[in-house]
């Protein structure tokens, strides 16, 4: 082996450039972060040939002193931090002092800058082969201009790895989009080969901010996004931004932007929290879209954990994960048809169902119990058989409970009461056709607002419900909607019941790592609440003595290993709850009304009223949409009316 030698500054910078400067997009990212840290409010980027030939960035920031220009191109030279305490609470985007040195080592770089109190601007030039900077006076307004030419001209091997001009520019454009989203108060202009690609004006109001997001993410996103602004006062966390509706899902994760104190990140803890919040409403293989901003004390997050600074480490990871998950989960749960008001408390009770179905005389029924068809959800239920109204119970859980992990149907008296109520609400067939129009007209005459999903008109092919509201026509997938209603009530009923456990005839011994055994011992109370009884028998051994009745037939060992892995990685796990929810979702799917089951007008109206007060009623358990709205304007457009 050769003797240890000190690397030359040029070679050291080129090695560092391998981490910092991956492609032209990396150069733009570092230069933009420097401009934002300098207080710039207007930034212009000119690019030629995807950034390989030229990258010119001009800002109106604070500028650089004449004597600091050569130092700015040196490694580990920065104005962002000075002592260790500064590194532990970084509030700026850049702080390492490596970017300009790395860029200048693999390109021909010219930096021109002028401070507001200076009489003239100064310019420093350097090339990758010759690291000696040359300083000279120049003409330039207040701010800084960095010109990077012939990227990787002195490292041909790196240049061969570059993609096509279009591909490199797409990566570069994505960097500009991210930073434009992080700082909506700054104006951005991006030109490629002399053509303006983006011209983003600064946002000073909420509407301007939404306009910025619409320009970057597309108008479809902002039209189908939910705005949120939640603050955890005790822990000093604030989460705000926009999250796409579950129906506005993507096949890729290309529309996911998460910022921590203004810095774009892709962190596995954050990604896990968001995925958990959306998991119950997304179609299989789809991904949510969001633009979210998390603000917290810089001392509570470490940004110096990755060369590209895309990953961070939270001091209170479990707290942050729980805050993000609960905030997004609550917002999604509160999504209901526009105008629907959830009942007092949290989720609707089975005995508090609004049923304002129209009657034979054209008057609306009083608020009361509307029976919805649902088969008993026990093991003996015939999931595939068509449901008969004379043998089915109401859509709620009156008199129902879980026993031994299965569902026990309502008592005979409850069934008689609900069948009796069904008969009282049933209207003659000859008056059902005009019921929706009469009820809507009466509501408008009395100055009342019709229900958000309106009143049922008809049943289409035994699958879809057609309803009329003030906006136009509502189409409802009967099975999908009822499936979500039943599922939410089953979850609520399960949560109010004590989880019943079943002792194992032969205790299950598991060989685990010491860290997993320590985690199981620390989280023993959590496992016990979920119905498991775990004991530690050694440094690397666990024994399972009891399991939840509903999961007794599953792969218990694999489930516990996965739960422990999640707890070690994220601080908590939802796997057990997810497995239970999967069972409940299957039971709800089998118990929901089936296709070709003809519902009466009162039953259809009861289903609509249930949807208006049920959490996540916009999607079924599998993520499919349950209803859609066609406005009068859209219907007129279909038939070319008014043209």
Image: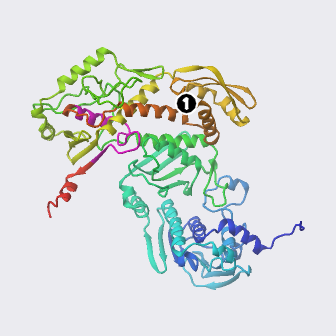
Describe residue 120's horizontal placement relative to residue 280 as left or right.
Answer: right
Residue 273 to residue 522: above or below: below
Q: Which residue is mark 1?
A: 554
Q: Position of residue 612 (x, y in %)?
A: 30, 37
Residue 416 covered by magenta stretch? no
Secondary structure of residue under mark 1:
loop
In this view, which residue lies farthest toward the top?
413
Q: 135 and 564: which one is in front? A: 564
Q: Position of residue 301 (x, y in %)?
A: 62, 49
Q: Residue at x 32, y 24 (%)?
A: 351
Residue 242 to residue 30: above or below: above
In this picture the colour scheme is rainbow
Q: Residue 544: which quarter of the image?
A: top right
Residue 605 covered by magenta stretch? yes
Q: Position of residue 582 (x, y in %)?
A: 47, 35
Describe residue 579's horizontal placement relative to residue 439 as left or right.
Answer: right
Q: Residue 587: which quarter of the image?
A: top left
Disc 1 packing (10 Å; few <14; some 14–19; many ≥20): few
The magenta-colored residue range is 603-628
* Quadrant that contains the N terminus: bottom right
* Quadrant that contains the C terminus: bottom left
Q: Residue at x 57, y 69 (%)?
A: 25
Residue 320 to residue 508: above or below: below
Describe residue 568's horizontal placement relative to residue 403 as left or right.
Answer: right
Q: Residue at x 55, y 30 (%)?
A: 554
Q: 226 and 538: which one is in front? A: 538
Residue 21 is at least partly visible in this image: yes
Q: Residue 516: which quarter of the image?
A: top right
Q: 611 and 137: which one is in front? A: 611
């Amino acid at each position: 082996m050769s003797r240890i030698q000190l690397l030359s500054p040029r070679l050291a910078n080129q090695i560092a450039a391998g981490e910092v400067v991956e492609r032209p997009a990396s150069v733009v990212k570092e230069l933009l972060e420097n401009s934002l840290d300098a207080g710039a409010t207007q930034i212009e980027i000119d690019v030629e040939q995807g950034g390989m030939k030229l990258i010119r960035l001009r800002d109106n920031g604070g500028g650089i002193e004449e004597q600091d220009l050569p130092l700015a191109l040196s490694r580990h030279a920065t104005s962002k931090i000075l002592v260790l305490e500064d590194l532990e609470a970084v509030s700026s985007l850049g702080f390492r002092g490596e970017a300009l040195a790395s860029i200048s080592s693999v390109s021909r770089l010219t930096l021109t800058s002028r401070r507001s109190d200076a009489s003239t601007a100064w310019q420093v030039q350097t090339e990758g082969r010759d690291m000696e900077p040359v300083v000279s006076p120049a003409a330039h307004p207040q701010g800084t201009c960095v010109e990077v030419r012939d990227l990787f001209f002195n490292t041909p091997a790196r240049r061969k790895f570059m993609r096509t001009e279009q591909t490199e520019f797409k990566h570069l454009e994505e960097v500009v989009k991210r930073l434009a989203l992080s700082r909506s108060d700054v104006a951005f202009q991006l030109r490629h080969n002399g053509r303006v690609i983006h011209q983003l004006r600064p946002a000073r109001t909420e509407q301007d901010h939404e306009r910025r997001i619409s320009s970057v993410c597309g108008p479809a996103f902002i039209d189908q996004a939910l705005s949120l602004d939640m603050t955890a006062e005790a822990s000093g966390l604030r989460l705000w931004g926009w999250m796409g509706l579950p129906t506005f899902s993507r096949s890729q994760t290309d529309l996911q932007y998460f910022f921590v104190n203004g810095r774009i990140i892709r962190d596995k803890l954050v990604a896990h929290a968001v995925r958990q919040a959306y998991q119950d409403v997304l179609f299989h293989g789809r991904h949510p879209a969001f633009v979210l901003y998390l603000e917290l004390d810089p001392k509570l997050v470490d940004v110096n954990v990755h060369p590209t600074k895309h990953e961070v480490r939270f001091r209170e990871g479990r707290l942050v994960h729980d805050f993000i998950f609960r905030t997004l989960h609550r917002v999604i749960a509160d999504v209901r048809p526009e105008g629907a008001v959830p009942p007092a408390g949290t989720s609707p009770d089975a005995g508090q169902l609004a049923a304002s179905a129209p009657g034979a005389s054209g008057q609306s029924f009083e608020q009361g119990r509307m029976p919805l068809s649902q088969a008993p959800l026990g093991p003996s239920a015939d999931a595939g058989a068509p449901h008969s109204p004379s043998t089915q119970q109401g859509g709620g859980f009156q008199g129902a409970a879980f026993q031994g992990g299965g569902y026990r149907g309502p008592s005979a008296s409850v069934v008689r009461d609900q069948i009796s109520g069904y008969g009282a609400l049933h209207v003659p067939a000859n008056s059902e056709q005009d019921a929706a129009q009469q009820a809507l007209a009466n509501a408008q005459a009395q100055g009342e607002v019709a229900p958000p999903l309106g009143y049922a008109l008809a049943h289409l092919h035994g699958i879809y419900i057609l309803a009329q509201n003030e906006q136009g026509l509502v189409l409802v997938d009967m099975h999908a909607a009822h499936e979500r209603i039943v599922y939410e009530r089953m979850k609520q009923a399960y949560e109010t019941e004590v989880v019943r456990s079943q002792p194992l005839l032969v205790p299950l011994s598991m060989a685990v790592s010491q860290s997993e055994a320590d985690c199981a011992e620390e989280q023993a109370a959590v496992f016990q609440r979920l119905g498991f009884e775990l004991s530690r028998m050694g440094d690397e051994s666990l024994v399972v003595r009891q399991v939840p009745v509903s999961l007794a037939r599953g792969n218990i060992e694999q489930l516990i290993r996965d739960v422990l892995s999640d707890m070690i990685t994220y601080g908590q796990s939802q796997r057990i709850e997810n497995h239970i929810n999967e069972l409940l979702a299957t039971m709800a799917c089998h118990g929901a009304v089936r296709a070709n089951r003809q519902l009466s007008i009162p039953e259809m109206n009861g289903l609509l009223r249930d949807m208006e007060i049920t959490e996540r009623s916009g999607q079924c358990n599998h993520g499919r949409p349950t209803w859609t709205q066609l406005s009068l304007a859209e219907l007129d457009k279909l038939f070319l009316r008014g043209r």
